[in-house]
Image: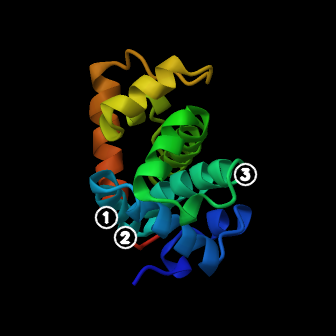
Amino acid sequence: MITLSDFDPEIVARYRITPRRLEQALRYVRLMGEWGRLTLRDIAVGGYYGTAALLHEIVELDALLSRDRQLLGRSARQVRLFLNQNPDAHVQALIAEYTYLRRKIRQVFGQDVPIGALVQVNASRSDVEWLIESDAEVPVWEPTAHDLKSAARWLSRLRELGKEMPR
């Protein structure tokens, strides 16, 4: 069972994630089919890595619900279509997720990894394209081979921590 105690309390407080909002985010993810199953797996890791995945969904869902309060009552197909019609919600969520991951890698491991490298090794190809096509000022293109290797290593280490959250 996924509970709020599985996640970074700083993010839970800052984004006012209540048990109800957590359940809404999980319901939203379940509506996404195969992609949603992968995201649920990431959220279930808990700790900092799971917090990043949950943060993405909270930010995205907040943006979408501000435009359609009844979104979670719609069909899976309608929800996916609505997301595709509102790419800025997904871009905002990606920025929040990867900014958080970068900060936690710096805090926990003392490593400064470029956001672009984190995105390139952890996000889907379509996520990278959405960022590039957006007006967001996120340097996602052309990270060095060293940066990509470093990003993969530190993301893996963060994931391996599971629910453990060293300060």
In the image, what residue occupies the spot 41% across and 23% down? 129
Q: Quadrant of the N terminus?
A: bottom left
Residue 117: which quarter of the image?
top left
Residue type at the position of mark 1: Arg
Residue 126: which quarter of the image?
top left
Q: Give the secondary structure at mark 3.
A: loop
In the image, what residue occupies the spot 35% across and 68% down? 45
Label 2, residues with CA under 10 Å away: few <14, some 14-19, many ≥20: many
Q: Nearer the viewer, mark 3 or mark 2?
A: 3
Front residue of 4/125: it is 125
Marks 2 and 1: in contact by CB < 8 Å? yes
Q: Give the secondary structure at mark 2.
A: helix
Residue type at the position of mark 3: Ser
Residue type at the position of mark 2: Ala
In the image, what residue occupies the spot 29% across and 25% down? 146
Residue at numbered disc 1: 41
Q: Give the secondary structure at mark 1.
A: helix
Could you tell me residue 151's position as x and y percent? 35, 37
Residue 150: which quarter of the image?
top left
90 versus 155 height, above or below: above
Whole-angstrom CA distance, mark 3 to mark 2, is 26 Å
Residue at numbered disc 2: 44
Q: Quadrant of the C terminus?
A: bottom right
108 versus 130 height, above or below: below
Whole-angstrom CA distance, mark 1 to mark 2, is 5 Å
Residue at numbered disc 3: 66
